[in-house]
Image (tube, rainbow, N blue to C red):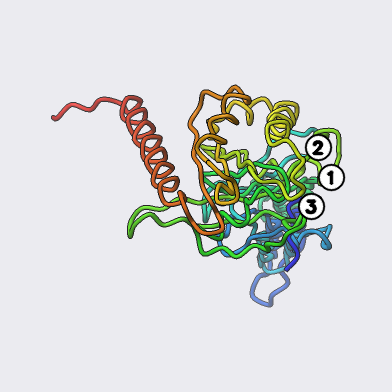
């Protein structure tokens, strides 16, 4: 299935059914009286997060989505049926915004989350509601109201704990294949990754985290070069970024330090918030260089890096296990901090 992470749709809630004005004509009702029923309420449009869906392809080619209209009222005080609600199932992580204003309408961050997008129109009233002691034969009824309608922009931001950054052919796809069951395409030429890939890394039976691999960046990506920065939004929800660097470029001429600086610069130009996230340096392909420790130390010094550094060989798994355990500890620490913060914000209750 083609990966689609953006779509624009128009949603229309159902109009309310009209009320009617009728009078009783039965044989044993000599005085008659009003008998017009109410219309039914219009159906509403809801968005529902579904973990079994991973792309917005269903909304790329279906631009207009309508909920059912309410039925009109009928004689003999029969009320029209309400319109059926329209449930739009979307991937977990979809952000919905109003196309006209740019305002965020909903963020479907959890499976099963349901959000109202457009409210159905109110039903019209039949003439039975307007009978009174001074008006026993009312001919008044009301029309149903129009349902809401909006043009919405859907943007999928995948849910992952860890995101991979790096130039094309830095070994990101090989790394995610090495530590998870994900099987992205791997080849000895640039831009083999054309869409985001997710992998679940299981450290042990009850501890795991999700890692995201996005297409590689190149210098000038923030200005539209290469694949641009379109897929960087998928790293927005991550807690940690791994900056993979190829210590053994295929051409033997490319400067890894210059490439690493280019990635950092493009990230900063694109999004300061993303740039400020915790970032670890991962030096890959150490199996292809002599005296790997000295080369790594020289790179760190030239790059002027003072953060965490890991050396790995994604192709044979050397160093990958140590890295995944360090990531798991980092994730556990973040979870503990969140739990402590939540406890501090909880109201204090005293026993009765």
Give me the residue at 50% from left, 60% from top.
180
Q: Which residue is mark 1?
A: 226
> Picture quarter containing residue 164?
top right
Q: Quadrant of the N terminus?
A: bottom right
Dot in front, 1 or 3 = 1
Q: Quadrant of the C terminus?
A: top left
- Outermost residue, bottom side: 27
Front residue of this view, candidates 52 and 351: 52
Q: Which residue is mark 2?
A: 221
How crowded is the residue under tag 2: few (<14 C-alpha within 10 Å), some, or many (20+)?
many
Front residue of this view, candidates 91 and 128: 91
Instruction: Give the x, y percent position of residue 330.
Output: 41, 37
- In terms of sequence position, does the residue under pointer 1 or pointer 3 come before the other? 3
Q: Is residue 141 above or below residue 349?
A: below
Residue 96 visible in the shown view: yes
Give me the residue at 69% from left, 41% from top.
233
> Picture quarter containing residue 254?
top right
Q: Is residue 29 above or below residue 218?
A: below
What's the CA distance linking mark 1 and mark 2?
Answer: 6 Å
- Outermost residue, front side: 290
| Secondary structure at numbered mark 2 | helix
Residue 19 visible in the shown view: no
Q: Which residue is mark 3?
A: 7
| Secondary structure at numbered mark 3 | strand
- Outermost residue, left side: 352
In the figure, is residue 291 to the left or right of 133?
Answer: left
Instruction: Give the x, y percent position of residue 146.
Output: 79, 49
How crowded is the residue under tag 3: few (<14 C-alpha within 10 Å), some, or many (20+)?
some
> Picture quarter containing residue 52?
bottom right
Instruction: Give the x, y percent position of residue 112.
Output: 52, 56
What's the CA distance linking mark 2 and mark 3?
Answer: 22 Å
């Amino acid at each position: 299935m083609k990966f689609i992470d953006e779509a624009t749709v128009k949603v229309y809630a159902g109009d309310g059914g009209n009320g009617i004005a009728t009078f009783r004509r039965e044989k044993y009702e000599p005085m008659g009286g009003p008998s017009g029923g109410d219309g039914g309420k219009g159906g509403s449009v809801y968005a529902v997060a579904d973990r079994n869906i991973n792309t917005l392809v269903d909304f790329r080619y279906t631009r207009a989505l309508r909920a059912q209209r309410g039925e009109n009222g009928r004689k003999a005080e029969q009320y029209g049926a309400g319109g059926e609600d329209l449930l739009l199932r979307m991937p977990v992580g979809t952000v919905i915004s109003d196309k006209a204003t740019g305002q965020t309408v909903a963020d479907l961050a959890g499976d099963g989350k349901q959000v109202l997008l457009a409210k159905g129109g109110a039903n019209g009233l039949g003439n039975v509601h307007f009978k009174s002691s001074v008006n026993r034969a009312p001919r008044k009824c009301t029309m149903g109201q129009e349902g809401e309608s909006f043009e919405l922009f859907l943007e999928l931001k995948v849910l992952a704990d860890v995101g991979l950054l790096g130039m094309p052919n830095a070994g990101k796809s090989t790394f995610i294949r090495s530590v998870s069951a994900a099987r992205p395409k791997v080849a000895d030429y640039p831009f083999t990754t054309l869409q985001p890939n997710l992998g679940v890394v299981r450290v042990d039976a009850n501890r795991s985290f999700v890692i995201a691999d996005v297409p590689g960046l190149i210098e000038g990506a923030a200005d539209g070069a290469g694949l641009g920065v379109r897929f960087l939004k998928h790293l927005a929800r991550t807690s940690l970024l791994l900056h993979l660097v190829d210590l053994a470029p295929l051409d033997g001429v490319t400067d890894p330090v210059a490439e690493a600086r280019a990635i950092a610069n493009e990230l900063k130009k694109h999004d300061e918030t993303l740039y400020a996230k915790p970032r670890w340096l991962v030096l890959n392909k150490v199996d292809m260089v002599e005296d790997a420790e000295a080369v790594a130390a020289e790179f760190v010094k030239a790059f002027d890096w003072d953060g965490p550094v890991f050396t790995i060989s994604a192709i044979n798994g050397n160093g990958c296990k140590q890295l995944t355990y360090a990531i798991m500890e980092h994730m556990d620490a973040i979870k503990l901090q969140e739990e402590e913060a939540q406890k501090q914000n909880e109201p204090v209750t005293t026993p009765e």
